[in-house]
Image: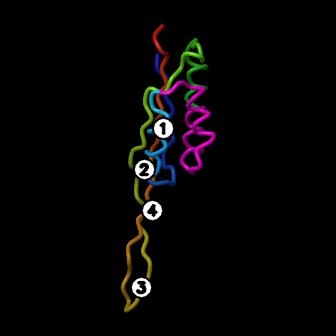
Amino acid sequence: MEAKARTRFVRISPRKLRLVCELIKGKGLDEAVSILEFTPKRGARILAKTLMSAVANARHLQNVDEDRLYVKQAVADDGPTWKRSLPRAHMRATPILKRTSHLTVVLDERPE
């Protein structure tokens, strides 16, 4: 039994989001929620919302024991990059890359 939730086109770079994803991989649900609650990074709030969405999907789709749920996978993939430019001296322009992410969280039940 797997429950999955995806958040797409998140306006944060995947590199920053992966730092937070590594904190909760393999952890139990209660532990993962408490880690995200006290992590002072912007990606922690986004990941917490996606995690709670995966829990809601697990409740809705299957009969699950929430005490046995754990984070099987938390992945931040590259989304599309917004390309902007910044005017510089002598009529030049510097490219600005505004990166986006696709976040996927997969929950599973621990075997007894």
Query: Could you say which is closer to the camera, residue 97 or residue 25?
Result: 25
* Residue 43 among those drawn in magenta: yes
Percent of width and height locating residue 86:
44, 78
Q: Mark number for residue 88?
A: 3
Percent of width and height locating residue 28:
53, 24
Is disc 1 in contact with disc 2, using a CB cutoff of under 8 Å? Answer: no
Q: How many marks?
A: 4
Label 4 crowding class (10 Å Cα cut-off): few <14, some 14-19, many 20+? few
Q: Mark number for residue 23?
A: 1
Marks 2/4: CA–CA distance: 11 Å
Residue tagged 4:
98
Marks 3/1: CA–CA distance: 40 Å
Q: Earlier in the sequence, mark 2 or mark 3?
A: 2
Is disc 2 in contact with disc 3, using a CB cutoff of under 8 Å? Answer: no
Name the kind of residue labelled 4 in the image.
Lys
Point out the stretch of residues depicted in magenta.
Answer: 27-52
Q: Is residue 29 above or below residue 77?
A: above
Name the kind of residue labelled 1 in the image.
Leu
Query: Could you say which is closer to the camera, residue 34 or residue 92?
Result: 34
Circle 2 — which element? helix
Circle 1 — which element? helix
Circle 4 — which element? strand
Marks 4/1: CA–CA distance: 25 Å
Q: Earlier in the sequence, mark 2 or mark 4?
A: 2
Q: Mark number for residue 3?
A: none
Residue tagged 2:
14
